[in-house]
Every structure is written in structure tokens, then in C-alpha cells.
Amino acid sequence: MERRAFIGVLTGGLLAAPLAAEAQQPGKVYRIGILLYYHARASQRLLDAFRQALHELGWVEGKNVEFDILTAEGAPDGLPGIAAELVRRRVDVIMGLEGRLTAAAKKATSTIPIVMVTVGNPVGSGLVESLARPGGNITGLSIMTVEVTAKSLQILKEAIPRASRVAVLQSWVGRSPVAKEVESAAQTLGIQVQIVVAQSPEALDEAFTSMIRGRSDALLVHSDPMFFLNQTRLAELAAKARIPAIFSAAEYVRSGGLMSYAPNFLYNYRRAAVYVDKILKGAKPADLPVEQPTTFELVINLKTAKALGLTIPPSLLGRADEVIQ
């Protein structure tokens, strides 16, 4: 295992709740492996949603299920090691919470079932053969990152009609299917795109300096575990630079960001529990279609808008699922 990777087993009663219904094979204790990019505290609210859904399906830690929670602590070179470690532990199912984690699990095993939770483009990234017939050992949920990102750019333009140059913050070098879609949407909207890369928390300050130098009128932040972990800092940096931003999860807005447009991540984690339940009861991942989100949440922080001197159009406010005063 890579030196920087940290391995921990979640304890303290992750699933310590009354049994709702007996699972198959009474007496067997199943092992669920969960891969995290960062420590569990960063995703605790989401893991709690997964936990509650499993409660309702009758799974109790120490009685019929155990959990191995492994984290790379933000080190990409640690992903192969923690995925291989789960395979060595002979878990019954692996949860790959996002794309890189699911890809690492796929490389580590072709037999242990893998449930992805928030993967942006599972077909385009080669994780599954198709949404309807995943094939292989992977299934789960997509968050439609390409489509959602393009829509986010439209919302950003509607909120800030004067914006003619938008910075796009990403954690990878080079172009991707998401970047291509953003550029296409930007061209339609008459917007120039400035791609800004930050591959570590330490690079975020320089990223915003680059946006200021590039005279970007607004900012779109891609979905990324590192960005999610630094949501408060990103909101603060955007406020300091006076750059209106749209984010990939509501948590950013509750931490002071201006806006977000995204699927309901809590829903995905609850649905992931359903996939895990079916697989532990004998279903094969290849036979379980990948689920795409059907509802999306627009969240707007009016306090942040006021601090930035922005007036959000009433038409946009009327469509918001949550408005933070």
C-alpha cells in the first residue's frame, strides 16, 4: 500500500440501530468496503444518509454487516493501494464514492461488486458499458456532470448578464468531456472561458490570483472531492476576490458561496444503500441499471449576493429550491 494512504475501520456504531427486516443468509456477517478520497469527517453527512437507508433495510453493524472505511487522504497515488487492500480483505461489495475511487476499485478487482455513488460520466469514462446494461461488476448512480455543468453556466449567465468571461476551476490538467461541454455552452452564450487549475488546497490562492489577472467576471467550480473538502475556503476566496461563483453542491452555498446547481447528493447516498442491499441479497451488478438523477437543486445565498452587490433576477429566485437569507 502507498505510504501516504491511511486505512481505518469505521467504529462507534455506524449502523447501530434496531433491525428492520432480516436479510438473506441469517448468521452471515457481510463486509462492505467504502473508498474515500478524504477522511470520513468530510463526507459524514452523506455517509449518515447511507447509514440511515441501510438501517431501514435491516442492516446492523456487528450483527449482519461490518464496514471497512479506507481513505487516501487526498493522495492520488494512494488510490491503487487502498483499493487493493479492500480486495485483500475479501469484502463482499465495494462503494466507490466518485469517479477516481470507482476506477481504482475497477482496476483492483473484476469480481467483487462495486457500487458507484456520484460518478459524473460512467459510460464516457469506461466504467460501465451502458446505463441500462452496465456489464461487468460495476453499477450504481451517476450525477450527470457534463449536463449539469453546462446548465450551471447558463444559470450563472442568467444571474450575471454582464458576465462575458467566466473562470472554470478544475483539479486536473488538460481538457475533458466536461470541459468540452462547458466551452460549447459558453460559445452559445457568448462567454469566454478561462480554465484555472488547482490540484491541491495550497494552489487555491494562486488560482484566484489567476482569475483576477484574467479579469474573469464569474466563476464555475467543478465537482471535486478536494474542492468539497475546502468549501468554506473557496467561498471566502470568491468573496475576497469579489467573483460571483456557482458551485457543484448545496454545501458550498451553506458555507457562504453564492449559488449551486446539482443533483441531491443525499438522495444518491440513500439510493446507494438500495444497490448494496440488492447485491448482498444476490443481485448481480451487470443486471442493475445505472440510475441518473431526475431532480436537481438550485440554491442561492442572498446574503452573499448582497455582499457582492448583486441583484438576483426574480425569475431565477422563483426557481430556487432553497434561498439563504
Image (spheres, grey):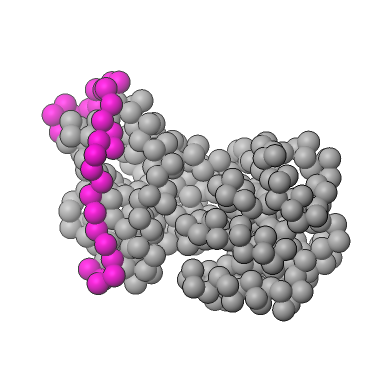
In magenta segment, residue 122: no
On screen, residue 27 versus residue 174, left or right, reads left
Q: Is residue 287 visible?
A: no
Residue drawn at the location 53% of the way across and 74% of the way down: 203
Residue drawn at the location 70% of the way across and 50% of the way down: 304
On screen, residue 61 versus residue 264, left or right, reads left
Residue 240 % position (x, y) = 67, 64
Q: Which residues are magenta?
A: 1-28
Q: Where 152 falls versus 74 (above or below)?
A: above
Residue 296 % position (x, y) = 63, 41
On screen, residue 120 versus residue 159, left or right, reads left
Q: Where 58 falls versus 71 (above or below)?
A: above
In this rendered view, identify the residue nearer to me: 23 or 33.
33
Residue drawn at the location 36% of the way across and 25% of the way down: 56
In this rendered view, identify the residue nearer to me: 212 or 298.
212
Which of the 4 image quarters holds residue 160? bottom right
Q: Residue furthest right?
A: 162
Q: Is residue 302 visible?
A: yes
Residue drawn at the location 55% of the way across and 70% of the way down: 204
In this rendered view, identify the residue nearer to me: 40 or 29.
40
Residue 5 % position (x, y) = 28, 66
* Quadrant of the image containing the C terminus: top right
Number of on-image labels: 0
Which of the 4 image quarters holds residue 232? bottom right
In magenta segment, residue 3: yes
**Main secondary structure along the magenta-highlighted residues:** loop
